């Protein structure tokens, strides 16, 4: 039996300390993320006691980055972003530029080189979407216009940082960092060639993923889900996330983060995206914790003693500088002060993208370990202070409401644009609801519960069954089933109405009813004509899937026989009544 337990020790120390310190942070009404970072500091090389394996922790952290970015892609909403584009796009871009410039100016005063200043400035310019969503959820403000503006703003920041992750390695040489081998080999044209090659690889990767992904991945995921194995489905989600991320890095030179983000975006279009997110969430959470622990291991607490002024300056840029810049930009865009306050509070912290960007800067020789420690110190302190910042923002909003004259003075100039944006948000929501209503069907659970045959199934078995259904539309007058045809499917009516004709007898069936099962169960030809009376939406379960399901659950065979006998008796009665009327 092998005795090298380095991996086990690293995982155990990370999880146990992260749990304890995360719980403590939660008790202190701080984000648990603060506890995870402190756990990393506790097992890092800069503190006494046990030191976790930094190499292993770094690789586990990469998995955390992949799953984090995969989750971001799964929840990315292009429609919501477009609804708030008038403030989120120019605001986020302007804020990133100004905050980065402030950071670079600060590092210029410290005597740092250009590349280090750029990386630090970019790291300080982007806030944590995770921390923001937690703060908005605690205030039930995620779906409010101001909350959606703040989320859209941070989505633009995330996309900008994805671009930065792509371009930074190509620009490392000119910024004073490590020059990629391809750039060294190309001589004086290294920068342009490196940029061209990088962009070409990224373009090829995006074309391949966005063209083939929607055609292959949702179908693959659906096919796996139809097996009914939760383990296989979870493995499929992980294989897609990790496989695309790893393949993008090895084949196209694209970062793991970018590959995972677009893998999530592709699966976001699948009807199983919610199930994919649910299946990957436990592992995503676990490895995200390890990511933050590994980041904490890089933090040298001694920087708080050696350079307290620099730490204070970094925190000042994050909590005050970025917030004031965002406040001014929102007001310049002629939006209300209340919107500006919400956005500025949302930006008064940094998080996961800052760590990823700073780590990339360190790996390319652009940012020193001291710079990384400053970023980490700024993150820990700003996340710790963020609940207080939001509390002050809430107090400011309450003060405005208590002073109507002042509120009108600051809110009136932006009321027109805010009303237009709110109308667009309402239109997007109404369009989504209308689309959902147009495709309104009974949920799989509702339909199966209406089918007596499957009353005894567990919720998991019902979920698997419904993955076998496919949709079919029938306009008025279309004959769905003809008497004498061979049985090939059973039909569930999700919307509309059909007429079943047995001889001269006619029966109307509506939403939630089903038909076609008797011939399928008995193996005999169809005994009735079924015609759509209205525009009808059907969910269809074909014969092969139906019989495969019965094979998996043989206990249903008795119910199948009983149901077939009852249906046959009903048809005999109808046919007899029709014969009596004819006589």
Image (cartoon, rainbow, N blue to C red):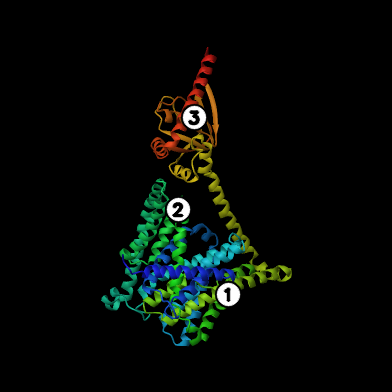
Check disc 1 and report the residue beneath it. 385
> Which secondary structure lies at badge 3?
strand
Q: Earlier in the sequence, mark 2 or mark 3?
A: 2
**How many marks overall?**
3
Quadrant into which the N terminus falls? bottom left
Q: Is residue 21 left or right of residue 55?
A: right
Query: In the rendering, at what x and y percent does residue 517 appear?
Result: 46, 31
**Residue 61 visible in the picture:** no
Q: Which mark is residue 531?
A: 3
* Comparing labels 1 and 3, the label whose residue is closer to the camera: 1
* Comparing labels 1 and 2, the label whose residue is closer to the camera: 1
Which residue is farthest top?
Answer: 583
Query: In the rendering, at what x and y percent does residue 171 appear?
Result: 37, 75
Query: In the rendering, at what x and y percent does residue 117 appear?
Result: 44, 81
Rendered image quadrant of residue 355: bottom left
Check disc 2 and report the residue beneath it. 269
Q: Residue at x 51, y 17 (%)?
A: 576
Nearest the camera: 259 or 465?
A: 465
Q: Residue at x 63, y 61 (%)?
A: 419
């Amino acid at each position: 039996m092998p005795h090298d337990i380095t991996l086990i020790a690293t995982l155990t120390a990370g999880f146990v300390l992260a749990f304890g310190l995360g719980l403590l942070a939660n008790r202190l009404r701080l984000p648990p993320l603060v506890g995870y970072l402190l756990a990393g500091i506790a097992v890092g090389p800069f503190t006494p006691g046990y030191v976790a394996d930094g190499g292993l922790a770094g690789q586990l952290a990469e998995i955390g980055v992949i799953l984090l970015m995969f989750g971001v892609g799964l929840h990315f909403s292009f429609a919501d972003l477009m609804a708030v584009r008038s403030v989120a796009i120019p605001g986020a871009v302007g804020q990133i530029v100004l905050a980065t410039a402030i950071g670079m100016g600060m590092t210029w005063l410290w005597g740092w080189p250009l590349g280090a200043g750029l990386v630090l400035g970019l790291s300080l310019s982007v806030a944590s979407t995770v921390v923001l969503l937690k703060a908005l959820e605690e205030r039930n403000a995620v779906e409010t216009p101001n909350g959606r503006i703040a989320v859209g703003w941070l989505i633009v920041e995330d996309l900008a940082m994805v671009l930065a992750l792509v371009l930074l390695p190509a620009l490392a040489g000119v910024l004073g960092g490590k020059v990629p081998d391809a750039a060294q080999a190309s001589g004086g044209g290294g920068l342009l060639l490196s940029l061209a090659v990088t962009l070409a690889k990224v373009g090829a990767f995006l074309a391949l993923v966005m063209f083939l992904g929607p055609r292959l991945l949702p179908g693959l995921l659906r096919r796996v889900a139809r097996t009914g194995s939760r383990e296989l489905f979870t493995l499929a989600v992980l294989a897609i996330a990790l496989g695309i991320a790893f393949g993008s890095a090895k084949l196209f030179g694209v970062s793991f983060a970018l590959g995972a983000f677009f893998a999530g975006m592709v699966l976001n279009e699948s009807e199983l995206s919610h199930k994919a997110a649910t299946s990957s969430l436990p592992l995503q959470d676990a490895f995200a914790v390890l990511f933050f622990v590994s980041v904490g291991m890089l933090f040298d607490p001694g920087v708080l003693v050696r350079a307290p002024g620099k730490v204070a300056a970094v925190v000042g840029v994050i909590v005050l500088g970025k917030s004031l810049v965002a406040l001014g930009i929102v007001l310049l865009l002629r939006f209300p002060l209340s919107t500006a306050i919400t956005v500025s509070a949302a930006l008064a912290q940094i998080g996961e993208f800052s760590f990823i960007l700073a780590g990339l800067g360190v790996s390319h020789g652009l940012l020193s370990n001291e710079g990384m420690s400053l970023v980490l110190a700024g993150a820990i302190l700003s996340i710790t202070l963020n609940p207080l910042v939001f509390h002050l923002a809430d107090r400011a909003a309450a003060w405005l409401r208590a002073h109507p004259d002042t509120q009108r003075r600051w809110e009136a100039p932006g009321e027109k644009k805010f009303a237009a944006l709110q109308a667009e948000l309402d239109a997007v929501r109404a369009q989504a609801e209308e689309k959902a209503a147009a495709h309104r069907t009974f949920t799989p659970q509702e339909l199966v519960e209406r089918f007596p045959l499957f009353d005894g199934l567990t919720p998991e078995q019902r979920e698997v069954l419904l993955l076998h259904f496919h949709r079919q539309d029938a306009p008025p007058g279309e004959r769905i089933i003809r008497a004498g045809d061979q049985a090939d499917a059973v039909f569930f009516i999700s919307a509309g109405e059909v007429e079943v004709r047995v001889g001269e007898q006619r029966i109307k069936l509506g939403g939630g009813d089903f038909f076609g099962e008797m011939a399928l169960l008995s193996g005999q030809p169809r005994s009735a004509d079924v015609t759509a009376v209205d525009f009808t939406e059907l969910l269809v379960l074909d014969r092969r899937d139906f019989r495969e399901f019965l094979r998996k659950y043989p206990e249903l065979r008795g119910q199948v026989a009983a149901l077939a006998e009852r249906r046959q008796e009903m048809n005999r009665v109808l046919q007899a009544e029709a014969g009596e009327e004819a006589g």
